[in-house]
Structures are given as C-alpha cells and as structure tokens.
Amino acid sequence: MDELDLKILKILQKNAKYSLEDLSAELKIPKSTVAYRIKRLESLNIIKGYYAQIDPTALNLDYIVISLVRARYGKNYHTELGSKLASLPGVWGVYFVLGDIDFIVIGRYRNREEFVENYLEKLMSMPEIERSSTQVVVKIIKESPNMIIWW
C-alpha cells in the first residue's frame, strides 16, 4: 500500500458511493488507475465490503451496554464462549482480550426491558461465565462506524 491507496481508502470511508469519476478528479489520476487500485484493495481483503451507515438512534437503539466478562477456563473456551456471546440478540461486538477479564461485549437495545430479556438473563445463565460486570453508556463522546486512517 502506498499514499495513493490510503487516499482512496480515506475517501471511500467517508462515502463508499463516491464515483470513479469523482475519485479520479479529486486525486488527479486516471479513472482506470482508480478502478485498478480499488480492485487490488478488494482482492487483498483490505476493502472487505461496502455498507450503509445506519443511525442506531433512528432505530431507537440507543440503550448501549458494555460487559466485561470473565470466563471459566477450559478447552477452546474462548472460541466456544465467544461464539455464544456473539449470537445473543443485540450484540454487535465481542472481543477476546488479555488481562483480568476475557471478553468485552458491546450491545445495543431499545430499552432496559429489551436488554434484560434478550441479553442479561441469557448472559447470567451461561455456566461458562465466572463473573461479569455490565455498564450502561450514558453519553457517546466518540463513535466511528469505520476504521479511521489517521496517518
């Protein structure tokens, strides 16, 4: 990857519907070069797909929870429990981490009742979990739907 690839990625992250013509004009390079670069980034799995950015609050999904989960150790516990956590309704992020906890789980719900029914009760009934601590987000300071290329 070079500086041109990074410029293309930055533009596509802001608007994946940006046309080849617009990219070509903004970067001052031929349209064929832009097309080639994008195809190469896709074939290298640097660009994995194109998505609509949906505002969760417009869907009334503004009850955000972050759980810190400590698991009971066992064979393949991280893949098995990780998959189980990921399958819970409303969960959109599961991270296996090192340290005092094993997983960070992030979910979005419409309200407390939906959170308790679809997430908390199921989480508490998993025998693979030793303990957990769940925080409710009060205010979003920064949230980015995509990877920000800052260099």
Image: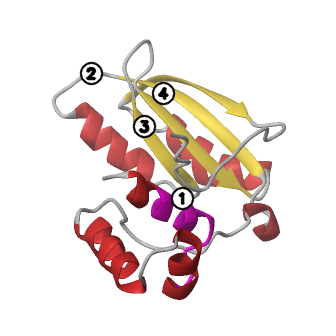
Mark 4 and mark 3: span between their CA atoms? 10 Å
The label number, if any, that marks residue 96 in the structure image: none
Toward which corner of the image does residue 142 lie, by quadrant?
A: top right
Alpha-carbon span between mark 4 and mark 2: 12 Å
Q: Residue 73: which disc?
A: 2
Amino acid type shown at disc 1? Lys
Marked residue nearer the N-terminal end (4 or 3): 4
**Residue depth check, mark 1 versus mark 3: number of the one nearer the observer:** 1
Q: Which residues are magenta?
A: 7-19
Sequence-wise, the earlier of marks 1 and 4 is: 1
Between 146 and 79, the one lying in front of the other is 146
Q: CA distance from mark 1 to mark 4?
A: 34 Å
Local crowd size for mark 2, using a 10 Å CA cut-off: few (<14), some (14–19), many (≥20): few
Of circles 4 and 3, the one toward us is: 3
Disc on the earlier residue, 1 or 3: 1
**Image coordinates for residue 25, horizontal then vertical, percent:** 57, 79
For badge 3, the amino acid type reads Tyr
Against 115, residue 127 (above or below) is: above
Seen in the image, is 110 located left or right of residue 7?
Answer: right
The circle on residue 10 is: 1
In this view, the residue farthest toward the front is: 28
User: Mark 3 highlights which residue?
Assistant: 95
| Location of mark 4 (residue) | 69
Q: Is residue 51 left or right of residue 138?
A: left
Q: Earlier in the sequence, mark 2 or mark 1?
A: 1
* C-beta proximity under 8 Å, tags 1 and 4: no
The percent position of residue 144, horizontal first and vertical second, equals: 64, 50
Q: CA distance from mark 2 to mark 1?
A: 41 Å
